[in-house]
Image (cartoon, grey):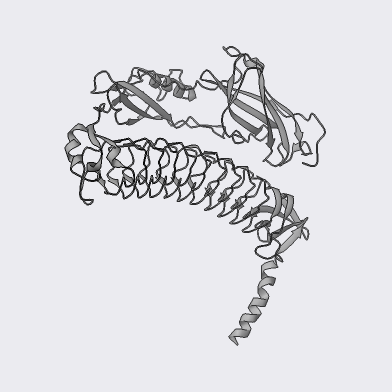
Amino acid sequence: MKQTILSILLMLLPMVASADVVEIDGIWYNLVTKGNVAEVTGNPSMGYFEGSYEGEITIPNKIKSEGVDYSVTKIGDNAFQYSKRLISVIIPYGVTSIGNRAFWSCSALTSVTIPNSVTSIGDFAFSDCKYLSSITIPNSVTSIGSYAFSYCSGLTSITIPNSVTSISEYAFVDCSGLTFVTIPNSVTSIGDLAFDCCSSLTSITIPNSVTSIGSSAFAFCTGLTDITISNNLNSIADYTFNGCSVLTSINIPNSVTSIGRFAFKGCCGLLSLTIPKSVTCIDENAFYGCENITDVYCKPEKIRTDIMADMGLYTYTSAFNNSYPEYIILHVPETSIEAYKAVEPWSNFKSIVALPPTCATPVISYANDKISFSCATEGAEFISNIIVSDAKEYYSSEISLSKKYIVSVYATKTGYEASDVATKEIEITSGGNTGPTLAGDVNGDGKVDVADHVELSKIIMASGTNPTPGPDPTPVNPSADDLETDKITASFIGGAYSSVNGRIQSGSKLNVKFSNKSSKSVTLTKMQLNDADTSIEGNNLLAEEVVVPAGQDASYTITVGLLGISKPVILFTYRYNNKTYQVKDEWKEIESPSIGF
């Protein structure tokens, strides 16, 4: 009896699975009648390893079935997987999620347009799409799933938006063609093997927002020569930089307390190494096979031979296996030389010498609307920085200023090691200061606005002996400057586009040009396609900064990602002599619309 019931259920499974699936204009949908929404899916009659789609697919934002309108809101799990002859897909605005394995192993896929409504990209969503060369992830996306872009060997660059807070494990594993990636300040964690085997990646900056990096996150990035690590990273995990054979230098920040097993195994390009005083444990084989290191600068003053002891640096005796420590000079605090000589692996080093003295940590003071620095090391110079939480892009008509600033500074002096970084959070208030009476009104104009932030930045940047200059506030086409701004223009120069009721449709190709007819070269830093009618601002479409010589142009083709954009505006941001400028142009139909792309 049980076997008979099971047989009946198995016979019914295909019927149940396809009961709400409809095919409209060559696309299959799961319909949810309760909410009148539709989910793109695959042909239910096809096998798991048989793709349902081929060619160029444009998904509508609405469909009609049996007289009922449905809004398309999701690309379902496995919807396009194994569609070996699928070339491009345009996803409409209104879709909020791309499901697990949605485009898995679509080996001919070269282009996907993701709208600004998508908030999540599922596990394996674009895994093994070998011909996908670039993709723009919109600012609406908050999560990128595990293996989301794994094995996309043709992917050369990707910009992760500042809405994403974590990069999941294996997200970009074996993207062997990836040369450029931008990690925003919103990201706090990078998962295990996230960029493992990205052999074409040459440099990367991990912002200070990141506090954890998983094991093997950058393992076998054999082209990686330079990396900047977050100053708030807690530890370097096992195998993190394993096999990064051409990495020439690494700055381990003072926030790191432990270096994991095989963390830098095979980093034979390293010539020197600095271990900050914050490190309390160097695990086994941490620097295995770093055969070209000549100098190690180890700053912890106290060492311990028992890993369970309370204070000091514990180092496994195998930490420098196959790195020829007998040829390495070890630099340690002068008062700690004898302690290092008594403990392996340090006692195996060629020689142990004293580090230069270290500058005292500066003290930050704020009074009378000015910030000042002092240091017990006489004659020290101060290198300072300020983080203003309000100094970022906004997408609203009103901004509430925090009036809080995080100031950081360190001291340097010839013949001395740089000091530890001192930080202080400052809230601008009138208090007992002799300056403005309105809290936060630094420039005394009777109101608190962005100009006050600019003024404070100038105050801080003038405090150090050799301050690092920051950019001036952004003017738009200033009329008087040492640059011939009237000779620098932005323009639309045509394209293959589709216009419906005066609206440029998603997937259209617009040709744009940045023209520098001035007598000086400038650096192009940002290119955006905005909709002036809806005030929607697009992402930065430049993979990297571009120097445009005097008298030359920079031309680009932009794929429209917004659905029905009514007033496309191209906005270029460029820099000259530490000043930033913008030029823009509004689209005008200068040729007959081209229906086919």
- Residue 124, how many percent across, how many down? 57, 54
Task: Answer above or below: position of 213 versus 83.
Answer: above
Residue 410 or residue 270, whichever sits in front: 270
Q: Is residue 530 placed above or below 476 in the rendered structure?
A: below
Please determine whether, in this image, residue 586 is positioned above or below residue 290: above
Asked if one can make out residue 44 in the rendered structure from this viewpoint, the answer is yes
Pick the front one: 30 or 267: 267
The percent coordinates of residue 424 (x first, y second) are 33, 30
Q: Which residue occupies 30% across, 27% down?
A: 418
Query: Does the rendering let one see residue 441?
Result: no
Residue at horizontal 55 percent and vertical 47 percent from the top: 175
Q: Tell me the quadrant of the picture where the N terminus can be found.
A: bottom right
> Residue lying farthest bottom?
1
Answer with the quarter of the image where residue 507 lies. top right
Report the number of numbered marks: 0
* Residue 161 x %, y %: 54, 40
What x and y, as percent, mark residue 278? Answer: 29, 39
**With 373 as the anchor, is 157 left or right in this view?**
right
Left or right: 454 as drawn, with respect to 397: left
Question: Closer to the camera, 399 or 181?
Answer: 181
At 65% across and 48% down in the image, what residue appears?
94
Q: Is residue 204 left or right of residue 530?
A: left
Question: Which quarter shows the C terminus?
Answer: top right
User: Looking at this rendering, what residue extends furthest in the right direction?
Assistant: 592
